[in-house]
Structure formats: structure tokens, C-alpha cells
């Protein structure tokens, strides 16, 4: 969308992980989550009417930068599952940083694949029926 492109123009090389149309204070806005190549997540609020950026803030700072990129993590997650990637985001649990990718399989099932951010190892594949 145009709002996503506006947000990405502020952070070259970044990727949109979520984009939601919301109402804040009676104004229609896009709440966009972007992750930059180093794994830092940003929240960008864009006015849905005029396309101006209302605010931009750094959300989560990953202290130890991942050794693999979000793009590489998506490739690893998609290697064994045929389907369409819905989103990928970086997360941390029990001190372990990983990428979580949701894929809608060609068979109609929803998959969640966790890829270790430092090794590229597939940590877990969860299937939602």
C-alpha cells in the first residue's frame, strides 16, 4: 500500500511485518510495524487520508543482532512448506532470539515456523488445523 511505501521510505532496506487500519482520536490511520535489516522493530503511524507520517518510534531493540537476516529466515521457513508467507517477525523467548513466520500452506493449513536468528536452525514447526 501507499502507506507502507511511505513508512519504508524512512528506513531503507527494511520490511513491513504488519499493517493495520485503525482509528486513533477519530482519525483513520495505518499502524505499520517495520523491521530494519539489523532486527530493530519500528512502529510507524501514517494518516490514512493524507498519507503523512504522524509518528515513528522504535519498538523492540534486539541487543544481540541476529546473524541471519529476516529474508534468509523466510527462505529457511519456506524450504519445506509450499504456500504463501503471511508475515515474519522477530521475537525472543527465554533469552533465545528467533524469527516467527506464518505460512498459509497450499493445502489450506496454517503453519508457524520458528527459525533461530543466530544459526538459521528450524526450532519448531506448528500446524494449525
Image (cartoon, grey):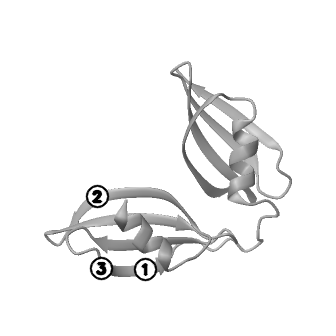
Q: Which mark is residue 21?
A: 2
Q: As rendered, which of 21 and 14 lies closer to the eye? A: 14
Q: Which residue is mark 1?
A: 56
Q: As rendered, which of 89 and 50 lies closer to the eye? A: 50
Q: Which residue is mark 3?
A: 52
Q: Is residue 34 visible?
A: yes
Whether 58 is drawn above or below 21: the answer is below
Q: As rendered, which of 19 and 2 lies closer to the eye? A: 2
Q: Which residue is at the far left?
A: 26
Q: CA distance from mark 1 to mark 2?
A: 16 Å
In this rendering, would 43 be left or right of 14?
Answer: left
Question: In x, y percent, where is residue 78?
Answer: 69, 37
Q: Quadrant of residue 41?
A: bottom right
Identity of the residue drawn at 45% across and 56% down? 18
> Which mark's residue is nearer the viewer, 3 or 2?
3
Whether 129 is drawn above or below 59: the answer is above
- Of marks 3 and 2, which one's residue comes earlier in the chain? 2
| Residue at disc 1, secondary structure | strand
Q: Are marks 1 and 2 in contact (CB under 8 Å)?
A: no
Q: As rendered, which of 65 and 75 lies closer to the eye? A: 75
Amino acid at each position: 500500500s501507499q502507506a507502507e511505501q511511505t513508512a519504508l521510505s524512512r528506513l531503507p532496506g527494511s520490511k513491513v511485518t504488519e499493517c493495520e487500519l485503525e482509528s486513533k482520536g477519530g482519525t483513520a490511520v495505518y499502524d505499520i510495524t517495520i523491521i530494519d535489516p539489523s532486527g530493530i522493530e519500528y512502529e510507524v503511524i501514517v494518516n490514512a487520508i493524507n498519507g503523512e507520517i504522524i509518528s515513528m518510534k522504535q519498538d523492540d531493540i534486539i541487543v544481540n543482532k541476529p546473524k541471519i537476516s529476516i529474508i534468509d529466515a523466510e527462505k529457511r521457513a519456506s524450504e519445506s512448506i509450499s504456500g504463501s508467507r503471511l508475515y515474519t517477525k522477530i521475537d525472543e523467548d527465554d533469552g533465545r532470539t528467533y524469527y516467527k513466520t506464518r505460512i498459509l500452506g497450499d493445502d489450506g493449513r496454517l503453519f508457524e515456523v520458528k527459525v533461530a536468528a543466530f544459526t538459521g536452525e528450524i526450532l519448531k514447526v506448528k500446524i494449525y488445523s
